[in-house]
Each structure stands twice: as C-alpha cells, then as structure tokens.
Image (cartoon, grey):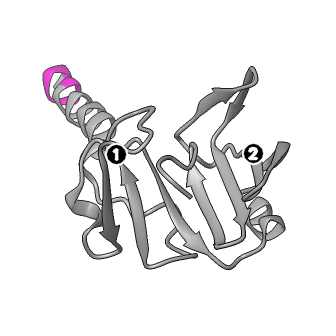
Amino acid sequence: MFKNFAAILAVIAFGLTFYPLYSEKPPVFCAYADEYEIYLSAGSFGDNIATATKATFANFTGVKGESCKLTAPYSQVLEDFSATHLFSETTENGESYYAYSPKLRYKTYVKGKAVNLHYFAGKSGNRLGTPMIFGSF
C-alpha cells in the first residue's frame, strides 16, 4: 500500500516539476499584438532574435524574453501587469520606461534594480519588452 502511495506521489511531483517546461505558453504580450520578437538567448542585443506569431510562438523553446509593437499607453501596461514603475530615461528617439511586475518570469538588473518590463515610446511608435527590448527600436 505504501509503495503505491509513494509511486503516485512521485508521479505527481514529476508532473508538477516538468509540466510547465513543456506546456504551451502563450506570448506574454498576446493581449497587445499578433506578432512578436522572441529572444532566444539572455542578454541578446540583436543576435538570436526570431519573429513569431500567436500560432508559431509555441514552436520556440528556451525563450528568454520577448517584445512587440503596441498602441496601449504605458499606464495601461502597468495596470495590466500589476507593475511598479521604477525609472525612465529620455533619449533623442523617445522615452524608455522601466518597471517590475511580479507576474513576469523574466528579469534583468538595471541601475541595481530588478527590471522585467521595458516600454519605449518613440517617434516611430511604441514597443514593449520583457525583460528588456533588445535589438533596435
């Protein structure tokens, strides 16, 4: 009896541990866009970036982050992700906003703070990324 119980517990523990790795996960920003840039390596500043749609997103493994173009304002993104605004930076091309959300699994450190939500409002439109927007924007 005890062996059966232990075997059942082992199967449940195994399933709970590995199911999230293999289950289909939608893009983080699926509410904002239909096309995404997928980051296939951490700290990628232009290399290992692929383009995906909602239909093809599940084909990618080892995703380290993503970004998309969007029209939603920064305040809406903060609300949707229960995020806290950390700081912003102004450049000649636009404004970068950095935030942290407990709902997002990706993160990096900027200026000593954990950041996992990056919103850029620029002349050519808005972009949203997690943990950061990599490549050009």
Q: Position of residue 92 (x, y in %)?
A: 77, 55
Q: Provide the major secondary structure of the magenta segment.
A: helix
Question: Mark 2 or mark 1: which comes first in sequence?
Answer: 1
* C-alpha separation, residue under disc 2 versus residue under disc 1: 21 Å
Compared to residue 104, the image places residue 29 above or below, namely: below
* Residue in front for this viewpoint, 52 or 4: 52
Q: Image quarter for residue 60?
A: bottom left
Quadrant where the C terminus lies?
bottom right
Q: Which residue is mark 1?
A: 63
Closer mark to the observer between disc 2 and disc 1: 2
Residue in the picture at 28% in, 41% down: 62
Q: Position of residue 20 (x, y in %)?
A: 34, 45
Residue in the picture at 29% in, 60% down: 24
Residue in the picture at 35% in, 74% down: 54
Residue in the picture at 20% in, 21% down: 2
Amino acid type of the residue that numbered disc 2 sits on in the rendered structure = Tyr
63 sits left or right of 28 in the view:
left
Amino acid type of the residue that numbered disc 1 sits on in the rendered structure = Val
* Residue in front for this viewpoint, 70 or 82: 70
Q: Which residue is mark 2?
A: 98
Q: Which mark is residue 34?
A: none
15 sits left or right of 98 in the view:
left
Q: Can residue 4 be found in the magenta stretch?
A: yes
Q: Can residue 124 be found in the magenta stretch?
A: no
Q: Tell me which segment is drawn in magenta.
A: 2-6
Quadrant where the N terminus lies?
top left
Q: Position of residue 75 (x, y in %)?
A: 84, 66
